[in-house]
Image (cartoon, coloured by chain):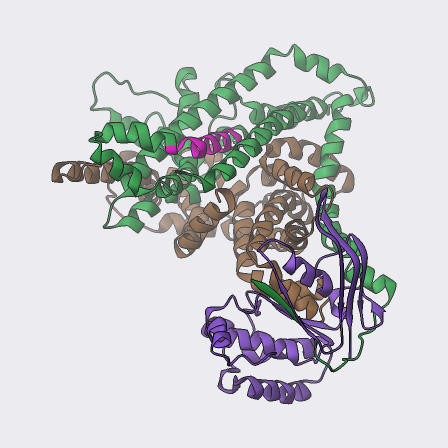
Amino acid sequence: MSGVSEKKGKGGPPAGSGGGLANFLTEGGGFLLIMLLPALLVLGFVIGLPMLKALILSFDTINFRRPAAAGTFGWHNYEKLIFDAQVWNAVWRSALYMGGTVVGSIVLALSAALLTRRIVRFRALARLTFLIPWTVPAVVTALVWGVMYEGNFGVINRLLEPLPFIDRADWLIDRNTALPALILAQVWNEFPVAYIFFLAGLHSIPDELYEAARIDRASAFNQFRHITLPQLSTITAVIVILLMIMGFKSFPIIFILTGGGPAGATETMTVLTYNTAFRKLDFSYAATLGILAVLISLAMVLAYLRVMKRAERGAGGAV
Amino acid sequence: MAHSLGSQILRTAALAVLGMIVLFPVYWMAVIALTPTGFSRSLAGIFPQRITFENFAMLFSERPMLRWIGNSIFVAAASSFLSLAFGASCGYALSRIRFRGSGLVLILVLATQMMPATSIVVPLYILFRDFGLLDTMQGMVLGHISLVAPLAIWMSKGFFDSIPADLEGAARIDGCSRLSAYWHVTLPLALPGLAAIFIYGFVTSWHDFLFAKTLINSQSLWTAATGISSFRGEYFTLHELQMAAALVFALPVIVVFLIMQRRIVSGALAGSVR
Amino acid sequence: MATVSFSKVVKSYGDAEVIHGADIEIGDGEFVVFVGPSGCGKSTLLRMLAGLESISGGEIRIGDRVVSHLPPKDRDVAMVFQNYALYPHMSVADNIGFPLKMAGIAPAERRTKVAEVAGLLGLDGLLDRHPRQLSGGQRQRVAMGRAIIRQPSVFLFDEPLSNSKASAAARSGSATGW
């Protein structure tokens, strides 16, 4: 290991050290500025400015139904928020929606990943099958599931008809089935993300672990329980948070299929924010709700970063 | 894992059933789209009985589908191009230059990507109203940049991370400034990655529903996403037309995915797990 | 013609000081080898001389010019990197000719110089190839060609023996002291 420094005996022409400003722009701190500034300006305009505006709106009273109230500044939106049962119900419904999509997606994705893991023939086809729903736009997901859920002619009711004990239902109109029906559509659309992660996670488990377990006569179930599951724990944490964030953000599926109904049974934070602004035209209160949503997602982002850091540290020493 | 023939067959059967269930909605969309208008409700089984393309013809002749698709393509292309133009250099700076606050910039970029778009769209609506950008294509492009630019920054940082820094070192010794090393060496090498980001951004914009729904009012400026979603409700009984529209809207992305799937999957994994 | 001198050069990353006041004088035409365990700062020293790493204190001179804070392009040094750092998207000819292109030399003159250097290094038939189509030894020669074409006043060579072919050549005594 040696570094060799050698110089040729021919003195090349000393390159002029350029003007101060030109060098500053192409080499020094100016270069950093050139690279960062355009993006930061653009982001400032399309994200920073709106966030600032949201903050201002949340202290103002911009309600197109009551234009006279504009300019009344104060904490009133926040005071209202704290005691607004509709808001906390929406937070709870978002939590249910997130919980449902997380559990559903993980069960579906893990089953699919375990099933496609060791197959030899049609491997690519099998993987593609479970990735296709990911490429379907949320709007299309909503329309297709809407057609399938339809009460009178929907294919789901028709397929369930021969089965005993299950009644035909107006899935999206019934208060009790609407939220689970939406969750199922969301799971179908988003589980491929979890599937990819699980495939990668399973791929990184060394075969020797299973060989050792077989020598120790562990049953297939015990191998799953004592090798596969623990080895997947970190990646599962990443997936859970990612799916929670995706579920919290979800809008088109809920909005198109139920609009928050029936009677508010599916009104999550995003739908409530939209309805408050664009149906009730109370933009100040909607902005306040938006800020609450940002705070909630910020907490999840921080959790995500923590888990990712742990995952990166653990990646080197998987065994 | 046990390798007996019985368990093998069981696994294969389970896989086939699960696969069919997962693909069913896509299949069903196609079946209804190909069924003559009004006949889908009388379908007896789950197989098409008479195949027709009249729904697709109707979509383009009696509804402004072509115009909506055109709008979508324009908005998606413009917003991803601009996001990439601004975002790539930012991603480069975040990847290569250590400076105070770079960690904060990264976290902020990530956070904007992960918060609900409804939180942005409410104040954006009021701002655009003041700026006269509501119901304009420029406004839509700007709105979509807020969706795509954070993505472009985050992803391009990942691509630049994978290009050895020594190449720029060599270029700078060979007479380049930092800027020209970026231009002559790094950028050409990142081109395939940037193309992938462009496609990803294009798809993100193409799929968007919320911004299109709120920032645009005139039917002639609707994107395909808002256009096809309007079929639900307004033409409530026309399931066939609805599904034909959904298929037309979804198919290009599915095809692109099938062509690029290997890269997309490995890219998604590289960006998030490793 | 150039001498190189480090005086009291310090390098630290945050609180960690990795070079603690290096004083080195290298005469004109001298051939110097830095030897030491990995991680002792040989590469850092070279990179500071080339301008790829900033210095935290002290002074570096090439000839009678103080270069401590000049960008690499203004220092008139050339360097062969440990992994050669060939530009993957350029042909061998473009790789070797790149320093001349950056110096603003006309294409025609560039071509003759590249051909000259390629002949010297036995790369004649390979000018249209890309780095990935070359063997390790060929890559090293391309990297050397790129370094010598501009006749720099200082020539840096990071870990020249880490390539197995090159080290075999060195052992058999056929290394040509570039």
- The residues colored magenta run A231-247
Expressed as whole percent of the image width and height from the top left, the position of residue A271 reads: 56, 26
Image side of residue C140 versus residue C77, left or right: left
Residue C118 magenta-drawn?
no
**Majority secondary structure of magenta residues:** helix
Residue occupying the point 68% across, 41% down: B105
- What color was chain A assigned in the picture? green
Q: Quadrant of residue A57?
A: top right
- Is residue C137 or residue A7 the one in the foreground? A7
Name the spot of residue B7 as percent of width and height, x first.
16, 36
The colour one sees for chain B in the rendered image is brown
Q: Position of residue C120 (x, y in %)?
A: 57, 87
Quadrant in the rendering for residue A49:
top right
Residue visible at 58% across and 15% down in the picture: A88
Q: Where is residue C3? Give x, y as percent.
A: 78, 73
- Name the side, left or right, on which C34 lies relative to C175: right
Residue at 44%, 52% in the rendered image: B252
At x 34%, y 51%, the residue is B53
Residue C60 in view (yes/no): yes
What shade does chain C have? Answer: purple
| In magenta segment, residue A243 | yes
Q: Quadrant of residue C63?
A: bottom right
